[in-house]
Image: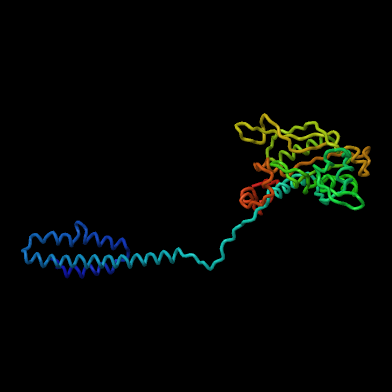
Amino acid sequence: METPDQLRDALLKDINTAGTVQALEDIRVAVLGKKGRITDMMKGLGQMEPDERKAAGQALNALKGEVADALEAKKTSLSDAELDQRLMTEKIDVTLSPVPESKGTIHPISQTIDEITLIFGEMGFTVAEGPDIEDDWHNFTALNIPLDHPARQEHDTFYLPGEDGERKVLRTHTSPVQIRTMTDGEPPIRIIVPGRTYRSDYDATHSPMFHQVEGLVIDKTSHMGHLKGCLIEFCRAFFEVDDLPVRFRPSYFPFTEPSAEVDIGCTREGGEFRIGHGDDWLEILGSGMINPNVLSNCGIDPNEYQGFAFGMGVERVAMLKYGIPDLRTFFESDLRWLRHYGFRSLEVPGMVGGLNR
């Protein structure tokens, strides 16, 4: 029969050569488990004489304690080695430069202007720009706006002191750029005019400073059919609804005759607003054929040339397309709002890849 000393030497050798925590656990079960070698030896103590049993019991208890201590020490050593190995394989080199995080976004107004410009650019329009501070003639008179028109009143318009008693005005629309284009150049003309405009108004759907995009076409052959075709194609391309219903509703503007407001189809069924086929309409822009008086004011013969014009609020169409409920949030510089509604710098609109994300 194997003696405790012999068993000790064999067990300590096995413990020292164990290479993994699992191998060590197998040794523990084989030695100290219910059917382990030391357990079996202790079961045989009952068959010994009292004096012999006492000596054997002490020896086995000492062996059991020594083996348990050796197992624990080896387990600690193996666990530390395994942890060191994991740390070596999973370590992070903190000396490396961090991955750059893109925080800036393109404002929805800038994105919307780019989308509108792209669509009309595909139709052959070019971009024209002009000053934000205008004189009365370019902003009102040349556009056939009468002296008693409400738009000329101070409660609607921001006036500035001018020279020789002539007041300057923060332009109330981008139409003065159309006037400057017609007076400085010659037909044919096909331009769009994006830019800031100013009116004395402020609420959830109006801002004292906002953005417009207007369009102007002057040649010898353009007619109402061309206007309708141009704007129908724009609406369907911008809102990305191929069969978007579009209607032209008669209206009045001093600078166009005839004039029409453009509505697009929508639905509010179930309390949810969606653009497309439905039982409701929503006005998005104004349009019309250029009033002959405007052409004459700009030195263009209305008997030879004709054309059409249109205009829309950038914030309004952006709110409709991107589901933005309050116009005032466009100008609050809230980073949370910009992260939610903004566009990544590489999300450039394109007619092939799409106009938005």
Residue 122 visible, this orientation: no
Q: Is residue 283 above or below residue 356?
A: above
Residue 83, percent across and down?
39, 65
Q: How many marks?
A: 0
- Quarter occupied by residue 310: top right
Q: Is residue 347 above or below residue 97?
A: above
Residue 266 vs residue 48: left or right? Answer: right
Q: Residue furthest left?
A: 49
316, 123: nearer the viewer: 316
Residue 96, percent across and down?
54, 66
Question: Which colour assignment does the render follow?
Answer: rainbow
Residue 293, percent across and down?
91, 38
Residue 175 vs residue 2: left or right? Answer: right
Residue 277 vs residue 58: left or right? Answer: right
Residue 123 visible, this orientation: yes
- Quarter occupied by residue 120: top right
125, 45: nearer the viewer: 45
* Residue occupying the point 67% across, 36% down: 275
**Quadrant where the N terminus is found in the figure:** bottom left
Q: Is residue 311 above or below residue 73?
A: above
* Residue occupying the point 32% across, 66% down: 76
